């Protein structure tokens, strides 16, 4: 626990120090700065920002940083708006407790393999066994007698890693097999799977669907189609959030209103992402 608190403080100091370099300050020239989850960015944010500029003249600068950055950077005023594909770690977390998460769309975690892979479907239990190293060959999943190369994200608090552990295991601290190939972010994970026919990984469908070298495995017989995600027939569905700090400006509030409006939600749906109206409610959100 002491190590966790210490690392959180180091992360906060790091965000504070870099807040004076590279990017104009928040609210520069009346425009807005968005940062955070790359999957959220690919799911809808680029087109939503474009539509908002056309409507209002306000430009939204987009940068990455990951889901954790999207939650924590708005809390200290580093950015105006963030994006996240995971919940807060905890209401007690000193870096995240003052950030508000606003659900705007739905995404799905998908099992990605090389497009030449012949396996089509696995169960949730088989996915667990692959992640824990209990299944190590493709022949155990109906494929060839070749070893499985599991590719995972480095951080347990990334959007994919955190939500995968929460939804599949109910344990956000569980460790996966030690000999997995480790990558820093979803982009490198997806690229690795595109180039290696015996590899397998988990990513967000909003990002992975843009890569031609990948295919998605069905889970428990359900394909991750937009229709199945909306109806929750596909098992691993998660919300996508916009994040704001404790005291958002009127400009920020106006953009959030646009994102939640019928016009903004139509932009999201047009990208192939399930919007709030299309998706079946899960019962609760972590805000």
Image: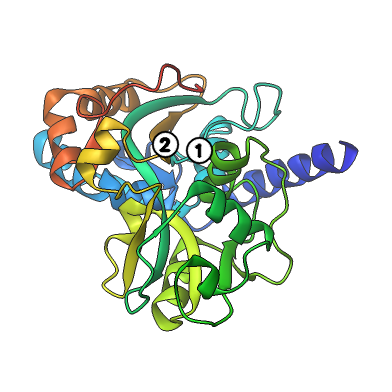
- The figure's colour scheme reads rainbow
Image quadrant containing the N terminus: top right
- Viewer-proximal residue among 90 and 106: 106
Q: Is residue 212 left or right of residue 122?
A: left
Sort mark 1 into few (<14), some (14-19) or many (20+) by Cα contacts within 10 Å. many
| Residue shown at 71% from the left, 28% from the top | 94
Q: Which residue is mark 2?
A: 238
On residue 196, the disc is: none
Any part of residue 57 in sight: no
In space, the residues marked 1 and 2 are separated at their CA atoms by 8 Å
Secondary structure beneath disc 1? Answer: loop
Q: Is residue 130 left or right of residue 74?
A: right
Determine contact: label 1, label 2, CB under 8 Å.
Answer: yes
Q: Which residue is mark 1?
A: 86
- Viewer-proximal residue among 142 and 20: 142
| Residue shown at 34% from the left, 27% from the top | 252
Q: Is residue 6 left or right of residue 103?
A: right
| Residue shown at 53% from the left, 82% from the top | 145
Tell me where residue 152 sits by quadrant: bottom right
- Viewer-proximal residue among 91 and 206: 206
- Residue 187 spot, x, y in % from top left: 44, 66
Secondary structure beneath disc 2? Answer: strand
- Residue 228 spot, x, y in % from top left: 26, 40
- Residue 179 spot, x, y in % from top left: 71, 72
Sort mark 2 into few (<14), some (14-19) or many (20+) by Cα contacts within 10 Å. many
């Amino acid at each position: 626990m002491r190590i966790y608190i210490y690392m959180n403080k180091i992360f906060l100091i790091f965000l504070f120090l870099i807040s004076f370099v590279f990017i104009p300050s928040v609210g520069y020239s009346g425009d807005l700065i968005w940062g955070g989850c790359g999957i959220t960015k690919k799911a809808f944010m680029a087109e939503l920002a474009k539509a908002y500029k056309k409507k209002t003249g306000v430009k939204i600068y987009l940068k990455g940083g990951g889901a954790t950055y999207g939650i924590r950077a708005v809390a200290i005023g580093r950015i105006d708006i963030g994006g996240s594909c995971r919940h807060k770690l905890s209401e007690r977390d000193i870096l995240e407790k003052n950030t508000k998460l606003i659900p705007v769309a739905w995404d799905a975690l998908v099992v990605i393999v090389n497009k030449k892979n012949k396996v089509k479907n696995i169960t949730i239990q088989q996915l667990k066994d692959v992640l824990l190293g209990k299944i190590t060959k493709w022949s155990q999943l109906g494929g060839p007698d070749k070893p499985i190369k599991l590719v995972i994200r480095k951080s347990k608090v990334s959007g994919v890693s955190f939500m995968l552990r929460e939804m599949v295991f109910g344990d956000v601290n569980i460790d996966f097999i030690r000999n997995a190939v480790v990558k820093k972010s979803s982009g490198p994970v997806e690229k690795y799977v595109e180039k290696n026919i015996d590899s397998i990984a988990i990513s967000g469908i909003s990002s992975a669907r843009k890569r031609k070298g990948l295919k998605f495995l069905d889970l428990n017989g359900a394909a991750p189609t937009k229709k199945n995600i909306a109806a929750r027939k596909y098992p691993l569905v998660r919300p996508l959030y916009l994040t704001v700090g404790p005291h958002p400006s009127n400009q920020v509030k106006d953009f959030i209103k646009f994102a939640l409006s019928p016009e903004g939600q139509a932009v999201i749906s047009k990208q192939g992402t399930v919007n709030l109206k299309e998706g079946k409610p899960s019962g609760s959100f972590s805000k």
